[in-house]
Amino acid sequence: MMEQESEYSYEKCLKKLEDSIPEYIKKVGKFQHENQEWELAEWKMLPRAAETCRVCGKRPIKELFIIRNLRTNELKIVGNECIRKIASPKIANWFAPWEMRRERLERNKPLMEHVDALIRAYKPSANLLNVKGVGEVPFHVSITALKKFRKMRERLCKGYNATKDQRGLWKCYCRRIIEAVEQHKKANTPALDSR
Ligand SMILES: [Zn+2]
């Protein structure tokens, strides 16, 4: 039986990335601040925000850590420098790369969807590639390359860049696909000189 490839879309990957925030926030737990217990309630990145850190007064801050007082439910906006001091540097260190991952995911969207399309268009049992607008073209992808493409797709989906090796392999396969399509078209075009 051929395994069913699940579709990777930008939207699905972005949702996964976004879902990792509440999961992480839950794991942070409580911390002491001004002799009271607080927890992290929310995190926001607002590029155009003009908010003020309610601990040190720094303004404007773009990255907002919203903390909640466990006794009074008071909410307080804290910047990334102060969250390091009052809670843990680990928290700020987790969110900074998160934002970069989101940006990278967006940048790599076409590449990820392209890799995903190749993986799903390939029929390993028959060595055929289903090419849009052309149909099934004889094509062979090695098991090793297929595994690498799956890893590449996973990396891109998580908001990391593809490795140099993965990008190189991808380019090589793109050229091979173009060649295979051209050969397939030639083979399926009736000779014109018989007219
Ligand atoms: Zn501050």
Image: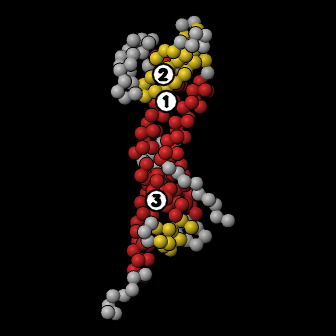
**Compared with residue 62, is residue 129 higher up or lower down, i.e. above or below?**
below
Relative to 48, is 25 on the left or the right? Answer: right
Nearer to us of marks 1 and 3 is 1
Rendered residue at 40%/68% (across/down): 178
Q: Which mark is residue 81?
A: none
The answer to whether residue 85 of the structure is visible from this angle is no
Mark 1 → mark 2, Cα distance in angstroms: 10 Å
Instruction: Respond yes or no on whether mark 2 lies under 8 Å from ligand 1.
Output: no
Nearer to us of marks 3 and 2 is 2
Mark 3 → mark 2, Cα distance in angstroms: 41 Å
Residue under numbered circle 3: 169
Rendered residue at 55%/71% (across/down): 127
**Compared with residue 96, is residue 8 higher up or lower down, i.e. above or below?**
below
**Residue 47 point in image, percent of width and height:** 37, 29
The answer to whether residue 4 of the structure is visible from this angle is yes
Mark 1 → mark 3, Cα distance in angstroms: 32 Å
Disc with the residue nearer the chain's start (3 vs 2): 2
Residue under numbered circle 2: 65
